[in-house]
Image (cartoon, helix red, strand yellow):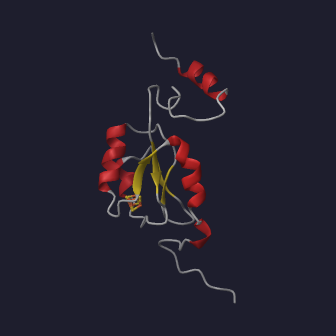
Amino acid sequence: MAFDPLSAYIQFEDITKITGFEAVLGGELIQKAVWVDEATCIGCKYCVHVASNTFVVDDAYGRSRALRQNGDSVDIIQEAIDTCPVDCIHWVGFEDLERLDKSLNRNSFQSLGKLPKMSKH
Ligand code: SF4
């Protein structure tokens, strides 16, 4: 049976909790998500050059972030993980993504590649 991305998307819209098994997440069973520990990232952009459909360096903080989960093959994403010089890209469970994202205190990040934030006091 041919894979119909539209029907997969319509099915996905009705799902309230993401499990990682939704066909729209790459058209196949995907059991893990990729996540960047932005607090550790040094903004070298190696991951972006390897898996450019998955990672993007944030303009404000100069740190990498996984923009989408189905942009590159698992092998390419694994290559990006292996390329990271500070080992801050991890395979995690889909159900952990929201908690991990909330654990990042981006207000405390020093913007990489920019002048230090100045205290107003
Ligand atoms: S390779 Fe690692 S340190 Fe470099 S930008 Fe990507 S996540 Fe950050």
Measured as percent of width and height from the top left, residue 81 is found at: 34, 51
> Is residue 86 depicted above or below 76 in this figure?
below
> Residue 6: x, y in percent?
58, 21
In the displayed orientation, state which residue is furthest to the right: 121
The one nearer the camera, 82 or 50, is 82
Q: Nearer the viewer, residue 63 or 18?
A: 18
Image quadrant where residue 119 sits: bottom right
Between 37 and 68, the residue placed more toward the observer is 37
Residue shown at 49%/66% (left/top)? 39
Q: In which quarter of the image is ligand 1?
A: bottom left
Number of numbered discs overlaid on the protein picture: 0
- Direction from residue 78 to residue 41 in the image, left or right: right
Q: Is residue 70 left or right of residue 121?
A: left
**Residue at x 53%, y 71% (from the top left corner):** 111
Which residue lies most toward the top here? 1
Q: Residue at x 35, y 57 (%)?
A: 46
Q: Position of residue 120 (x, y in %)?
A: 69, 86
Answer with the quarter of the image where residue 89 lies: bottom left
Assign the C terminus to one quadrant of the image. bottom right
